Image (cartoon, rainbow, N blue to C red):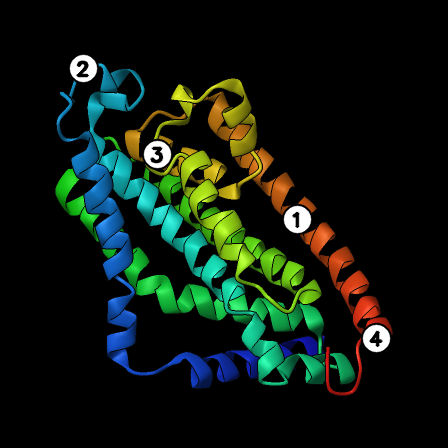
Amino acid sequence: MNVFWQTLRAELIKQRSDSFKGRMVFFSLLLWPALMFVSAYFAMKPYRNGAGSAISQFIPGGNVSLFLLSGFLIFQLFWTVVQSAWTFERERQMGTLELVWLTPASKMAFLFGRSIYALLSGMWMFVIFSVLIFVFVADFDKVLWGYFAFSLVLALISALVWGVFLCSICLFSRDSSFIYYIFQDPMSLFGGVRIPITVFPIWAKVCSFFFPVTYSLFLLREAIGGSISGAWWDMALALMVLNAGIIIVTIRILVKAESYARRNGSWTLF
């Protein structure tokens, strides 16, 4: 356990030294989610919303702003860890991966360190979206604060587990750019970030349940809307089971990846 915490601390320090290029870099990260939100909002703007509208059949109360803000709030958490996995190939280029394989360092702690730093670096954007939700569009009387806090904590844990899983997949490949193309747009589409899942055909709904962001968004939106039902507890339990399953799969991937690297790698190429 001591090795785990030492490796985790070392990876966090390394990530900060390698990734921190000034405050303007972190500020620039707000640009993309802001543009995505504005684009999605004005795409729905021509349609009548509010109570009694067609949109209100799929978005409770027809509150498009609240629906999109909550969607991008959760999506931003998961996107930061996808971005961390996307840049995983740099660990090979810098020789970090060789050191991890050739030393007693904890491989799981190494992956957790990357995901934790990714979440911490994007946390301020998470806070900004949270403030926007409550100041401008949320109804304070409806929000169930206990459920809301639980939803956020579970979403953070789910994003962390998801990031570790994606990084473990990259251990088999020297090109991690495929992570971006496979998980960016599908996660946004099938997760219900901009489009309600209820309008999807059956096959798309099935796809949506492979992404933790789907469960996290459902829990958060129900808590904000003040409508907790048995389905909320079912989704919370399903998300926790999914996280446990992802952790088990990640551990197995780590074992196979290390075996693969030692069998097919060399002293200079892992």
Tell me whether the residue at label 3 lies in contact with that at label 1, contact meaning CB atoms closer than 8 angstroms: no
Q: Is residue 238 left or right of residue 230?
A: right
> What amino acid type is highlighted by mark number 3?
Arg
User: Which residue in the protein does label 2 denote?
Assistant: 53
> Which residue is the site of mark 3?
221
**Label 3 to label 4, Cα distance in Å?**
46 Å
In front: mark 3 or mark 4? 4
Dots 1, 4 in contact, CB < 8 A: no
Find numbered disc 3 in the image and state the secondary structure of the residue it sits on: helix
Q: Residues within 10 Å of mark 2 (few under 14, many from 20)?
A: some
* Res 246 label: 1
* Cα distance in 3D space between marks 3 and 1: 24 Å
Tell me which label, 1 or 4, sits earlier in the chain: 1
Q: Quadrant of residue 150?
A: top left
Pick whichever of labels 2 and 1 is earlier in the sequence.
2
Residue in the image at 75% along x and 79% along y: 101
Front disc: 2 or 3: 2
Amino acid residing under circle 2: Ser
User: Which residue lies at the image location 82% right of the left edge and 67% below the top edge?
Assistant: 260
Find disc 4 in the rendering and name its residue: 262
Q: Residue at x 46, y 53 (%)?
A: 156
Element at label 1: helix
Q: Position of residue 56 (x, y in %)?
A: 24, 18
Q: Give the spatial CA distance, label 2 vs label 1.
A: 40 Å
Q: Is residue 222 left or right of residue 67?
A: right
Which numbered mark, 2 or 4, is in the foreground of this view? 4
Amino acid type at mark 1: Ile
